[in-house]
Image (spheres, helix red, strand yellow):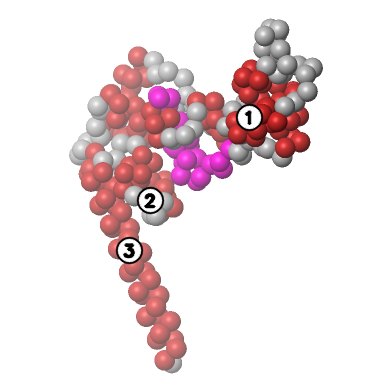
Amino acid sequence: MKTPAECRNRRSCRTLQEMRYVEKHYAPRTAADTGASLGRPASSVACIACKLGVTRRKAELWTEEEKAVIYVHYAAGMPMQDVMALLPGRTRGTILAMADKLGIKRPSRWSQKECAILKNYYPSEGRKTAERLPGRTADAVKLKACELGVDQGGGGNNQAWYDDEWAILKQNLHLTLPELVQLLPGRSLHAVKQAHTRLMGSTKQRRHVAMRSRKNVGNV
């Protein structure tokens, strides 16, 4: 409940100074915060703002790259502070809301039994270890293995790339290498760079072959 001091100007006429204050401060602040400064209830401030045509800035739309962080890292159980570090400008609340909108549920904490299974089988089975861990996705398994320092046989940079990793890379070729590393947990910058170069080379080669084919058809 508002105290008398907070609503000291509740029934008084609005002054030009107050309207200028609302016009300047309403957009970046809440109606309650602005009202507390003016000694007016939030409803009164909102009414003033409406008459002045002042509205709050709309929340920025989520990019596909930001959603990818939710799909890959949030869904895999990355600590919230690390997820927030990958999404500058997004609060914990907005991240949780977007995850709920996308239907992404955060996995529960790993048990000692699950960690033991991971350490035992990940070096030989890699992400397929997820089949031994009900409720854990392949990305969650890979992220946890990286967190525990468990490598698949052959080392991280020599591991075969999975189809979904190639798909993520193909869809985000416009991103920088550090940004791509964020979308591919468990892959080093060097590994991502090699895969990126390989993919770009095969793409250029396909374009070259296609151009030659069209040229040959035109000469027939």
* Cα distance between the residues tagged 1 and 2: 42 Å
The magenta stretch spans which residues?
Answer: 59-81
Which residue was labeled with disc 3? 202
Q: Is residue 179 above or below residue 127?
A: below
Residue 81 versus residue 10 in the image, above or below: below
Q: Residue at x 44, y 52 (%)?
A: 171
Q: Nearer the viewer, mark 1 or mark 2?
A: 1
How far from the left and from the top, in percent, is residue 145?
31, 28
Q: Tell me where residue 167 appears, x and y as whole percent.
A: 42, 50
Q: Determine which residue is flagged by label 1.
A: 21
The residue wearing badge 2 is 175
Instruction: Looking at this view, name the residue that lies furthest to the left.
Output: 154
* Apparent side of residue 11 relative to residue 49 in the rendered image (left or right): right
Q: CA distance from mark 3 to mark 2?
A: 18 Å
Residue type pointed to by label 3: Ser
Q: Amino acid at mark 1?
A: Tyr
Packing grade of label 2 (10 A; few <14, some 14-19, many >=20) is: few
How far is mark 1 from mark 3, CA to CA?
59 Å
Q: Residues within 10 Å of mark 3 (few under 14, many from 20)?
A: few
Q: Which numbered disc, 1 or 2, marks the residue that appears first in the sequence?
A: 1
